[in-house]
Image (tube, rainbow, N blue to C red):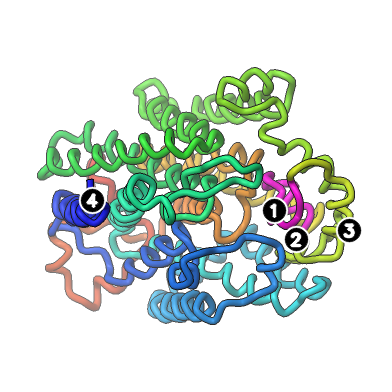
Amino acid sequence: MNPYIAAFICVCGIAGLFYLDRDRSLRPSKALWLPTIYLWVVGSRAASSWFSGSASDSVNSQLDSSPIDTMVYAGLLLAMVAVLSSRWREVSRLLSRNWPILTYLLFCVVSVTWSEHPGIAFKRWVKSLDDLTMVLIVVTDSQPVDALKRLVSRIGFVLLPLSLLFIKYFPLLGRGYSPDGMLMNTGVTTNKNVLGVVLLVVSLGTFWKTVTLWRSKATPDRKRHLWAQGVLLAFGLVLLKMTDSATSLVCFVIGSGFILLANRRAVRMRPARIHLLCIGIVLVAGLILLLGVGGSVAQALGRTSSLSGRTQIWAAVIPAAPNAFVGAGYESFWMSSNVEIFQHNMIGWWHPENLNEAHNGYIEVYLNLGWIGLALIGCILVSGYKRAIAAFKRNPSVGALMLAYVIISPVYAITEAGFRSPDPMWIFLLLAIISSTAITAGFGWETIPSQSRERVPRQISRRREVSAWALQDRSLPQKF
């Protein structure tokens, strides 16, 4: 097929998916387009690379700053801050309840002072604030559950079909080569692992939406929405296979399996059992990757027992950390002089010019922020788990998705830098934690049904409370 005809069909298909998934009864804020645009950028490639036709991930390119990328991220940050200024009451109450995240961000900005390139490190820290502001816009929406559903669909309807189009018909855009010379499918991104994590977070959210629709037989236009979500999920599964990102595939299987098990009556009626399910999943996945059994499993996934060379990277990069307690400074290790030590320790085709991460979220945090940074990440994960458990007990349907994102994050970080901004896994971890906080906050306002929201006086509607998360999901009885 002619590539341009395929492109036309793809655009029509994207428009058709949006049309199938339409719901005029849902009216999330127009500000939701800001997080959507941000995730379109994060989930594809830098704005400057679209204009130049190429992108570089080398260490040397980390010292460069594209004016186009700076303008895009700064513009989105300013716009999102302007939106949140009108929601400051809800935002302040949410932030005060998520002190581990704020403490981590504060330590990150303090660590800029001992970075070898403090100016670049500070710019990266400011850029990372886009993650938090994006999450807050979704969570403080007047219809937060509907906003989350629409956000996942908007991301998937655009990025997934375009990725398949690029791989099949525009290989110069959709394919590339790994450092060892192997052909890889990258889609709208510049790396197969980046495409893999985009597919992971979108497909997991789509799977949850599909399960929710399947069980909610009274949902208006249910069949039409099921078709849209089913097609999107099919795109995700096909691309996960084509991308050959084993970590994302395993995490999707874990997350989707958890959602199915968590929604069983035996678990929903006794939420305490969810602890055993979560702990079992994390322990089994971690032991498979870290102990000797990881070799056979890795080979079954098409990987070597060294996890595609990752164990060699970890052995070489850990001794190169400049300071065990505080690290090299926020996002500073890979542009520091200590990379030369790593190059000396590394033997093989992996070299600093091919690498800008340790392919392990915990080691990546250790290199940049030391043991203190690791302790703060641990606090975020523990507090996030507790909040997600509390959210599940109050709203099992939405809480199951939040828990799924929380439990796959530490698993994903075993072989990828999952705690790094602007990684989609890190963004959706923040989204899950802050959303869980909102579900259990109990600010005192109950949900106004979506169908009647347009009849609510504007001055009352603006006084929305984030406790709407606890009751808004249509698969559960709503209180009036």
Q: Which residues are magenta?
A: 350-367
Q: Quadrant of the N terminus?
A: top left
Residue located 50% across and 35% down the image: 244
Q: Which residue is mark 4?
A: 2
Q: CA distance from mark 2 to mark 4?
A: 42 Å
Q: In this rendering, which labeled residue sits more in front, label 2 or label 3?
A: 2
Is residue 329 in view from this perspective? yes
Q: CA distance from mark 3 to mark 1?
A: 21 Å
Residue 340, horizontal then vertical, whole percent: 86, 58
Q: Which residue is mark 2?
A: 334
What label does residue 355 carry, if any?
A: 1
Q: Secondary structure at mark 4?
A: loop
Disc 2 or 1, which lies upstream in sequence? 2
Disc 3 or 1, which lies upstream in sequence? 3
What label does residue 189 carry, if any?
A: none
Residue located 75% across and 55% down the image: 352
Q: CA distance from mark 3 to mark 4?
A: 55 Å
What label does residue 323 carry, if any?
A: 3
Mark 2 vs 4: CB contact within 8 A: no
Q: In this rendering, which labeled residue sits more in front, label 2 or label 4?
A: 4
Mark 2 vs 1: CB contact within 8 A: yes
Is residue 480 in view from this perspective? no
Q: CA distance from mark 2 to mark 1?
A: 8 Å
Disc 4 or 1, which lies upstream in sequence? 4
Residue located 37% across and 56% down the image: 467
Mark 3 vs 4: CB contact within 8 A: no
Q: Secondary structure at mark 1?
A: loop
Q: CA distance from mark 4 to mark 1?
A: 36 Å
